[in-house]
Image (cartoon, rainbow, N blue to C red):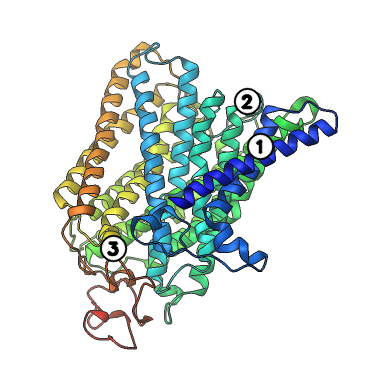
Amino acid sequence: MKAIYKGIAGALIGFVIGAGGLSLIRILIGLEPWELETGIVVGYLFALCGWLLGVGVWDYWGRGWFGLPLRKYKLTGWRRYFSFDTDHKVIGIQYLFTFLLMMLVAGIFAMFMRTELMDPGRGIMDPKTYNKLMSLHGMFMIAVAITIISGPFGNYIVPLMIGADDMAFPRLNALSYWLTPAVPILLLTSLAFQGWNSGWTGYAPLSVTNETGQVFYNLAFMTLGLSSIVGAVNFLTTVITMRAPGMTWGRLPIFVWSILSTAILSLLATNFVFMVMLMVILDRISGMGFFNPDIGGNPILYQHLFWFYSHPAVYVMAIPGLGITLEVITHFSRKPLFAYRWAVAGFLGIVIMSFTVWAHHMFTSGMPENPLPFMVSTELISIPTGFVFLAALGTIWLGKLWLKTPMLFGLAVIFNFLIGGITGIFLADIPIDLQLQDTFWVVAHFHYTIVGTQIFGLMAAIYYWFPKLTGRMYNERLGKLHFWVMFISFNTTFSPMFWLGINSMNRRVAQYLPEFSMVNTWVTISAFVMGSSFLIFLYNMIYSWIRGSKAGANPWNARTLEWQTSSPPPAHNFATPPEIIGHPYDYGLPGSSHAFFPISGSSGNKQVKD
């Protein structure tokens, strides 16, 4: 906790230096000493630097810039998780707890929203408050969906899977995590400045003219983007340069391919959303006019830049969920991953084509460009996506299915993603999109695609790797209870929204016609049931972590490298470096092995056999 206290002190000192220095400059040039939004922006930049230096960047990194000896604190136990620790496994746990907490907060916001929508007319809040709460819920969940698989499990599992002892840049890895606590703090602090009501997309010109809380949204998005870029550089470098001997690209586990694809998207696309958020801030505090048509600006420019990032970001959210699904169903089907190369081609095809479809979000925006090419490209991206889907179906076909909780969640991802994909085809066609845009059809489609893929994939990952992270087994009965309650209530919550959308119930609006009342009451009750399923999950995880039965090194008898070391792994992951000699998914092939440890201990359970 000492690092956090130092970080808070550094942030406060930094804010005072930044905002106070700005005020002094304004006085010297003859302006009023304080302008709220300019002071917030400049003060935050210094506060973020102070926070990072305080939590550990100065001791672990910054002192070396001035020729001073570095200070590294050798903490043990729970204290490691509240410090600037460079162990990729500690950082993975830090990401997991941070974003699970953010998901819980977003879920609470959703419960308030559904309570308001349970009946027509005003309920527990006025429309303005509803819009601000809806915006907070959306941005919290977008932050969660972007990071909650690649952050925790990309950090914890990927180095293990490729036979590395850590990430390529351990200090940069810790930096990418310690940027993220600023995101929920900024979003919640916005409420003290009247919040913002522009939704998670923050469209201009509304985002340029509304309350000061909008500035906190922009700063939060920029901070999240910076963390994503830093993390992407680390993932790419690690996978490219630190694979174990014999770990060729054709032997790379499919989950690693999904994280690699996600990192490419994050690195190439995130700078665009960072830029457009900065442009909004400059419009607000400097009068730049990027989006003001009266002085030559163009509001549609915002949407082009935003969606050029945000549609690839949909796949930043979805690809890790699909990757863990393929990983889990392969091991629990005891079959080689069907069409492995086509699945990899599917991920890489999605990466390439996701940059060609952004304007399908703008069919109703009045853009002067011809939208037909974007309709075609949006349809075509279903081809590489179909490769991944068919690889999943081919893997479970005639497999010896072991229906443990991770497998159930993996199968649910396939089902949910099918519905999300099919319903997305309607939105890709211009005539239909003109009717369904900004209705609850979009809400249902988006949640089936993101929650149904990413969050269900997250649950599969947590249950699958829980023994590896904790050294203990979860309660299987509670795990299956959690699955069935969550899966059924998820579908009873979001599938009726397709009917609401077809019948023109608008999203992002607190009021609706009385004829939608019964369906909305059903949706709200189902949403509360879905929310209660997470209480089962939390109880199971907490109790099992404390009192669960001890887990062996490889309770699933899986072939990939993370299961060939102790649970939890030692400090440097493996007692001796592994050497890869076969494919990770060659189940059922006589004499096949994925890896062996050529120095001491190469026999017994150190030999990875079929």
Residue 516 image-quadrant placement:
top left
Relative side of 523 to 378, left or right: left
In the image, what residue type sits under mark 2? Leu
Location of residue 306 (image quadrant)? top right
Give the structural element (helix, strand or loop) at label 1.
helix
**Place of residue 188 in the rendered image (x, y in percent of width and height, measured from the top left):** 49, 32
Residue under the point 65% across and 44% down: 46
Query: Where is residue 457 drawn, in percent x and y?
Result: 34, 50
Which residue does the numbered mark 1 point to in the structure image? 41
Question: Residue at the spot x=57%, y=25% of the render?
Answer: 193
In the rendered structure, find residue 584 and report the number of the disc placed on it.
none
Q: CA distance from mark 3 to mark 1?
A: 42 Å
Disc 2 crowd rating (10 Å Cα; few below 14, some 14-19, many 20+) is some
Type of the residue with mark 1: Val
Q: Earlier in the sequence, mark 3 or mark 1?
A: 1
Q: Which mark is residue 206?
A: 2
Q: With respect to residue 119, does 258 lie above or below?
A: below
Q: Are marks 2 and 3 in contact (CB under 8 Å)?
A: no
For the residues bearing labels 3 and 1, Cβ distance under 8 angstroms? no
* Residue topped by disc 3: 468
Q: Residue furthest bottom?
A: 599
Mark 2 or mark 3, which has the lower sequence index? Answer: 2
Spatial separation of the CA atoms under disc 2 and disc 1: 19 Å
